Amino acid sequence: MTDATTTGPITGAGLDHVLSPFRISGVELRNRVVRTSQGTGLGADRQVSDDMIAFHVARARGGVALAFADPAQVHWSSPGLLDLSTDAAVPGLARLTDAVHAEGMKLFQQIWHGGPTQMTWDSSAPWAASHVPDPGLGMLPVPMTQSMIDELTGAFVAASLRARAGGIDGIQFHAGHGYLFSSFLSPATNHRTDAYGGSTENRSRFLFEVLAAVRDAVGPGYPIGVRISPDGPPDQTTASDLTDLTARLERSGLIDFVDVSLGSHYGRDLLMGGAHEPPGYQLPTSEKVTRQTALPTIVAGRFTTLRQAEEVIAAGAADLVSMVRATLAEPALVAKTIGLRSAEIRPCIACLQSCAGGLNTRGRALCAVNPAAGRERTHGDAVIAPVVPGRHVVVVGGGPAGMEAARAATVAGHRVTLLEAADALGGQLRLVSPARREVADLVAFFAHQMELRGVDVRLGRAADAATVRALEPDAVIVATGVTPRRDGFQALRPAVPLSGLDTVTVHTGWDVLRGARLGHTVLLLDEIGHYESVDVAQRLVDDGHRVLQVSRFALVAANLEMRWEMMGAPLAARLQRGDFTLFPRTVLLGLEPGSARIAPSEAPQRGQELAFDDVVLMSGGVPDRALQDELSATAPVVRVIGDADSPRRLEVALVEARQSVGALDPAWVRPLARYGWGGSAT
């Protein structure tokens, strides 16, 4: 798979396959770019909301040909993000489909039952093929009886009819990822001895019965498809199994398309590959299925550019390519590519912090790099009110928060001067590991925005209060970030200074990422538990160091927002291929030259000594508030955003940057909003 960073600028030329129309049954698609079902959590009481409509309209307007709505529940035994178990769903679906159809996009509905992966509404046992607990939920399910199978079959039919009544263009049944149908299909989770267990045909009987019943109900012309996925482990559902299943489905005439993914809770890191996976990482598995069928096929796998999608389709590996996260970060990816504006595409950095992570921690999927994703009605550029006459806004700091604030301020019509102390834009993004290469693309995107929007960027300008005042600003946005701590602060010992600090040479994670020369054995104190910690540890391991990581967390990268198995586990596995040892739930008691005293946080009496050559302390950062304090006494409006206010996540920094446009009004009042929907700008 060609990487966008090595192919030069993407243009609308040479994309004949991905931009060509395509037909699924009677549904005409304007191109081959698809958004397979993403759990957005944007519904209101599990029904279509104005936020959900705005979200899909933005992607429809941006050129996506086909999107799938949030996974829909059909029955009380498995809650979903949309509820199609009653007729109350139909009016909302009609509003949603009318809105996206007006923009030229078609909308399919994924119909879903979580099976052993989901607790029921009333906390009774999950429904599944057999008594095999899912490794994620860990609750023993009840094997479905014939009456339960019949009940669910009726529920799937009813939900399908409601989708059609709501104007949905087609439906898809999720038969992968360890969910209900998958629990029947897999020999590892189906231990039945009746007509639904044993042979391949028997294990797929439930799926075939549901598809046949739905086909009878909706008629021959309405598109029906399935999503399938090899589990990952070789003793479970494999690509070979699914090739046979797809062939039998094709011969049956029950389905019109097949969507091939990868992974389940037995291989959760394969479900939604992070930056450690290359674009197209699922293809070697999925094309074993897609190349053996004449049905229209969809593939997924961290595709980020239309060039990558073009290669897949041109090679015959699939007919349609799913680009969920890429179009979450940039809704207009297709339109901007066609319009030869590839430098204006806001890139997905495959961090999973706010999409998968947001859904996991806040019940709503957002985006770390796009503050308007999921907030289109409040944070989109279209709702930025133009200010006439525009003001002169000085932004201090050229990191992500400063650049987004400068960009948004120009959208409002302000004249912006940006001061950056370093010789290049990017701030802390410039320290990110090269393994997360899309972060460099994000810096390039923002730098291009500064040029495109006429921001007066002044590099190498460390800004004190006098420098800022000399520019005679009407408003100042302080986005100066933080300075890394060197005091060895530990959250579990906030009142206890680290003894012996003055006897050793202290390095920070930033020093490591900037290429500091260290001895062989490095003691690394990790108080962050996030990507920065992994970047530092991996850099040391890759450079041949022995790394002894002392952490208050129980796992490597335990503070990541998404489920640990999805991202933390593969990052930990990569570290452990080198000379890396983690001391979990451990505190650093004291230092002396060449030696450290550590102990488990729950058992301080079980201390031990560690020998080291150098020490790296990662205790977070401290905002420098001096400039804010000096300016507040004289400048008309001063707002502080991002890490300069308090070190947090990239998403929050960019949300605050976007909100700072409204905060430039001296009469601005802080909006009441929870984290994830709003943010702060002090």
Image: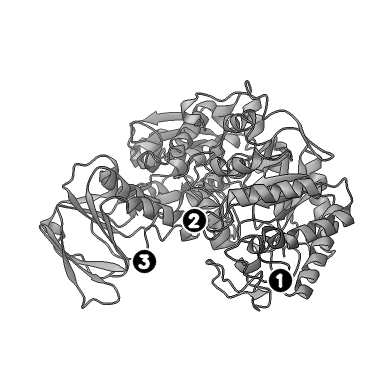
Q: Nearer the viewer, residue 192 or 645?
A: 192
Circle 3 — which element? Answer: loop
The percent coordinates of residue 602 (x first, y second) are: 30, 76
Q: Residue at x 58, y 71 (%)?
A: 132
User: Is residue 568 shown left or right of residue 82?
Assistant: left
Three-letter amino acid code of the residue under disc 3: Ala
Distance between the alpha carbons at the discs numbered 1 and 2: 35 Å
Nearest-to-viewer mark from 1 and 2 = 1
Q: Earlier in the sequence, mark 2 or mark 3?
A: 3
- Residue 656, which numbered label? none
Position of 202 relative to 384 (above/below) = below
Nearest-to-viewer mark from 2 and 3 = 2
- Residue 566, which numbered label? 2
Q: Residue at x 45, y 35 (%)?
A: 443
Circle 1 — which element? Answer: loop
Three-letter amino acid code of the residue under disc 1: Asp
Asked whether the residues under the numbered discs 2 and 3 touch, taking CB atoms below 8 Å apart as contact, a structural biologist would say: no
Q: Earlier in the sequence, mark 1 or mark 2?
A: 1
Distance between the alpha carbons at the discs numbered 2 and 3: 16 Å
* Residue that carries the numbered disc 3 in the rendered image: 554
Q: Is residue 514 visible?
A: yes
What's the colour scheme?
one colour
* Residue that carries the numbered disc 1 in the rendered image: 194
Mark 1: few, some, or many residues within 10 Å (few <14, many ≥20)? few
Mark 2: few, some, or many residues within 10 Å (few <14, many ≥20)? many
Asked whether the residues under the numbered discs 1 and 2 touch, taking CB atoms below 8 Å apart as contact, a structural biologist would say: no
Q: Earlier in the sequence, mark 3 or mark 1?
A: 1
Circle 2 — which element? Answer: helix
Q: Residue at x 74, y 44 (%)?
A: 257
The percent coordinates of residue 275 (x first, y second) are: 46, 44
